[in-house]
Image (tube, rainbow, N blue to C red):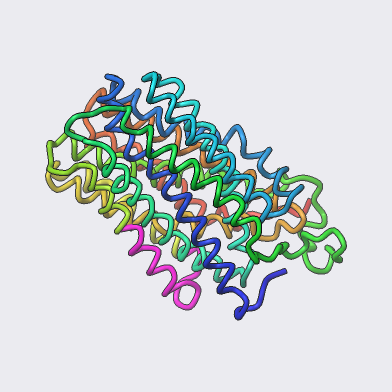
Amino acid sequence: MTTGRKTLVIPMILTGSMFAVLGFALGINAFFIPFVKEAFHISITMSYLVMTATFLSFAVFGVPSGAIIKKVGYKGGMAIAFLIMAAGFYLIAPSARITSFPLLLVALFISGMGQTLLTGAVNTYVTIIGPPESAASRIALMGICSKTFFAFASLILAVFMDLSNVNIQDTILPFYIISGVMAVMSGIYYFTPLPEIKAIGEDENEQASVVSSYAASKTNIFQFPHLILGAVAIFFDVGVEYIALGTINDYASILNLPSPHNYVWLVSAGMVLGYTSGVLFIPKYLSQSVALLLCTISGVLVTLMILLLPVTISIYLVAVLGLANALMWPAIWPLAIADLGKFTKMGSALLVTGIIGGAFLPLLFGYVADMASHQVAYCVCLPAYLYIMYYAIAGNKIRTQR
């Protein structure tokens, strides 16, 4: 069931702060990519393993995270997620002390497990806490928190590190601090007044045939085509989103632009602008599927301009990709978990596995950048946008009766 409008304020503030933590955790990757390239003397492709390590955990831990949420509820899952992230960030310090790139990847993988659990819990929670037709608007509001703190990660870590004289051991103190903060936040969130809620038809005691007749006839989550196709859409969405967020600093560094670590702010600003438009226009002026379609059309057009215009212009168009990408996740998630009833928690876990796109597409980007150039590498975004366009037009509407 959903919660009344008057009772949404505190839950939205609490979940907004969790989205901020997710944004900060993923923003660490964008900061690390050009940093580890110098610190560990590795190639561009190898440096993008930083993203791969984090996002691979979404595929490995996605289904187990659904089982955890089903067992302990959304709030319990959120608290456990913070503890796992704390453990992962704690391991970054010893990886820096012994200058071990493999251990750094292990640490980021463990942190990613916590992010997997938190992502599934908090996105589904925000989706079902209010009216279904305005879910994208609520997630867009959360996205403002996420992407603002994504950019803050680079700003905060730059305070501790001298980017003109790369020293991986400079990461030891900040990550001990971050780990401690995460552990404390786990306890704080566990005791917050965050109500435990369930989606329509999710309560086994409800008459599912009345409140969710579609889900009542199903025996497993693989009987929901719109969910399966939605997981693929999430795969491509996260891939293009973190290509834009995770590559612009590196692109600026390659072009020898001043303060390259600050360019991620341009993409984040574009995404915040897009999220704001979602809050204002969905569902009053745009449906979730129409908003998704407009985003994909914009993504295709901007990508083509990045490929065709001079590099001194194209790097700023990467920021415009942030605007195009902003409303894709907020629209895909509610469209994909619609009508799942008692399968909502496991359905959200399946969607979380799609986040593995953040591992593969940036890695493919890095490979193409090594073989050709950063500018040419943005071509990997085109097929992703075309698939999401299909999902916006038809894929989210596919239903089966059995």
Quarter where residue 380 is shown: top left
The structure residue drawn at horizontal position 21% and vertical position 35%, both measured from the top left corner, is: 163
Is residue 133 positioned above or below 118 on the image? below
Quadrant in the picture for residue 29: top left
- Left/right of residue 73 with respect to residue 227 in the rendered view: right
User: In the image, residue 338 lies at what x, y percent?
Assistant: 65, 60
Q: Which residues are magenta?
A: 270-290
Which residue is painted at 38% across and 39% down in the image?
174
- Where residue 280 sits in the image (x, y, percent)? 42, 74
Viewport quadrant of the N terminus: bottom right
Q: Which residue is at the front of the view, 334 or 270?
A: 270
Q: Main secondary structure of the magenta part?
A: helix
For this view, does 91 lie left or right of residue 216?
left
Left or right side of 306 for 100: right
- Say which residue appears at 54% left-offset and 33% top-offset: 110
Judge whether residue 271 is colored magenta.
Answer: yes
Q: Is residue 2 left or right of residue 8?
A: right
Please tell me whether residue 168 is drawn above or below residue 216 in the rendered image.
above
Magenta stretch contains residue 104: no
Q: Position of residue 178 (x, y in %)?
A: 44, 43
Identify whether 340 is placed above or below 311. below
Please, which residue is most extreme toward the bottom here?
Answer: 6
- Which of these two is toward me, 68 or 366? 68
Q: How many marks?
A: 0
Against 147, is 49 above or below?
Answer: above
Residue 273, position in %: x, y? Answer: 33, 64
